Image: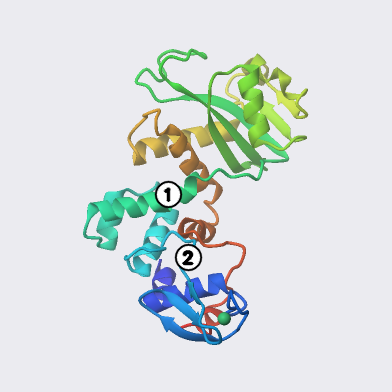
Amino acid sequence: MMQFQERFADEAACRAYLFACRWPEGFRCRRCDGEEVGVMHRRRRVWQCKDCGAQTSVTAGTVMHASYLPLRVWFWGAYLVATHHPGISAVQLQRQLGIGQYRTAWLMLHKLRRAMVAPEREPLGDEVEVDEFFQGGLEEGLSGGRARGKKALVGIALEVRGRGSGRVRLQVLTDDSADSLGSFVKATTAPGAIVHTDGWSGYNALSALGYVHRARSQRAAGPGEQLLPRAHRAVSNFKAWLHGTHRTTSHEHLPVYLQEFVFRHNRRVTPHAAFQILLGLSTRHQPSTYREITQHAA
Ligand SMILES: [Zn+2]
């Protein structure tokens, strides 16, 4: 946090960072290919080409575009949303950033969160645990087995990484039929991957779909041994997070919460990437050093 504070101490530092994200190899005019910056309009966050006068906004295409809020407030907002576990509310954001209106803070949070609900396309691979669980409804836990009731059925696919876990995918399922579960695995996991499941017959078609299916029943596993331990851990983390942050189990918003959890889980070790994605910055280029950033713009 101190590093962040030092690095983004003022508007100029934030502008310099945006500049370096947009032009990691130095300024290039989008119109004439000129390499010299002429005027910079600080207030409008615009850089102007010295040769042809074409203007480029450093916030174009980002979440900050056309916002009257200081860049620093956006940077801090993205930092808090990306690193604060579990999550952060609009009220907390308003308080921590000293934003006057609740609505402003709410809108900002909403815009930052939008980047989290964009579906991720890169499929899970190698070795994956797949399971399904119920979410929501007051009767949760009361009726056992696979009875549906008012609860939503959610599929989870989680990469096995040694004793730990890699990326996760969560998705609301219509039911636990072979069709639904097969579609879920196809949508989340690369063909050829090893897929661990419990003994439910709905998973029996996975081999035919091109996966190396390893099913195990609780009976075969024996008492005390947990099947799919990583998936179970992620599910309890999800439930605790949902209860602690959003305090709701409304079905209407469940898909959004699932995506937000997936985003947080998959980027828990790379908060810097999360920060950039939330602001809508390209993550293909990383400004490498502070000097490299500051030499281009001040
Ligand atoms: Zn130009």
| Location of the N terminus (image quadrant) | bottom left
**Quarter of the rendering occupied by the C terminus:** bottom left
Who's the residue at 58% across and 18% down the image? 176
The total number of labels drawn is: 2
Query: Is 234 placed above or below 179 here?
Result: below
Classify residue 18 as left or right of residue 71.
right
- Which residue is identified by label 2? 60
Per the image, the residue denoted by label 1 is 113
- At label 2, which amino acid type do we have? Ala
Give the residue displayed 21% in from the left and 60% down from the top.
100
Percent across and percent down for residue 233 are 52, 35
Q: Earlier in the sequence, mark 2 or mark 1?
A: 2
* Up-down relation of residue 283 to residue 263 (above or below): below
Which amino acid is tagged 1? Answer: Arg
Is residue 17 visible to the viewer in this orientation of the structure? yes
Residue 84 visible in the snapshot: no
